[in-house]
Amino acid sequence: MHTLFTALPELADDLSRFEQALTTFTEQLGLNLAPLSIDHISLRCHQERTAECWAAQLAQHGTCFSDAIIGGRPIHLYRLYQPLKLLGHSIEIVELPWPGEKRYRHEGWEHIEVVLPGSPALLGQRAMSLIDDKGLVMPGISIKTRRPKTHPGALDNTTLAMTNGDITIKFHTWPIDLVVASEQRVS
């Protein structure tokens, strides 16, 4: 068991729930995560005090390398000293957004982000080519592309998100730590 879960046992239980739900979702999509690179995993919470508690524990089990304000709220990125294990992947980075205006159904693990290297303009095509045709037309699946503003010279962080309303898988072209480093260099 990860040392983080000694302090936050509710996140250990929730990671099991998340892993099962993610497995179901990827099977419905016909998406094989095994050969892909899961860059990071993200939490969601409803209350600032929960975010502060989780942040304090994450800081004891890793290093915060970004504490940006995005969309009017803090979003921290932590590189864990010991990676989390999820579906055969080792994930070093945890994203912790503070609560915003949008309320999520669930507090806990909410999404993973997968790196698909290549042109940001072709990210959608690369992501869609990984999904079975039946997965693309499955009821209740929402697909959205977001291209955040960047500073000139920073890496493009175009993201394609697929969700069933409970679990989200996001695809982007660069690892998040490289995106953050590029933004810090040019800001």
Image (tube, grey):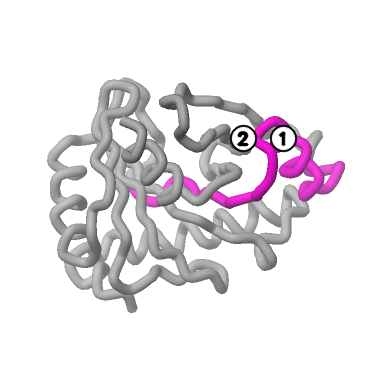
Q: Are marks 2 and 1 in contact (CB under 8 Å)?
A: yes
Residue holding disc 1: 124
**Disc 1 marks which amino acid?**
Gly
The secondary structure type at the circle numbered 1 is helix
Residue 164 percent coordinates (x, y): 60, 38
Q: Residue at x 23, y 59 (%)?
A: 63
Residue identified by numbered label 2:
160
Residue lying at the far bottom of the rendered structure = 1
Say left or right for 4 vs 41: left
Quadrant in the rendering for residue 147: top right
Q: How many residues crowd around disc 1 within 10 Å: few (fewer than 14), some, or many (20 or more)?
A: many
Residue at image point 64% right, 30% down: 142
- Residue 81 within the segment the image draws in magenta: no
Q: Is residue 103 above or below residue 95?
A: above
**Looking at the image, which residue is at 38% across and 70% down?**
83
Give the image location of residue 73, x and y in percent: 26, 27
Crowd class of label 2 (few under 14; some 14 to 19; many from 20; radius 10 Å): many
> Along the line of sight, which residue is nearer the eye, 36 or 84?
36
Quarter of image, res 35: bottom right
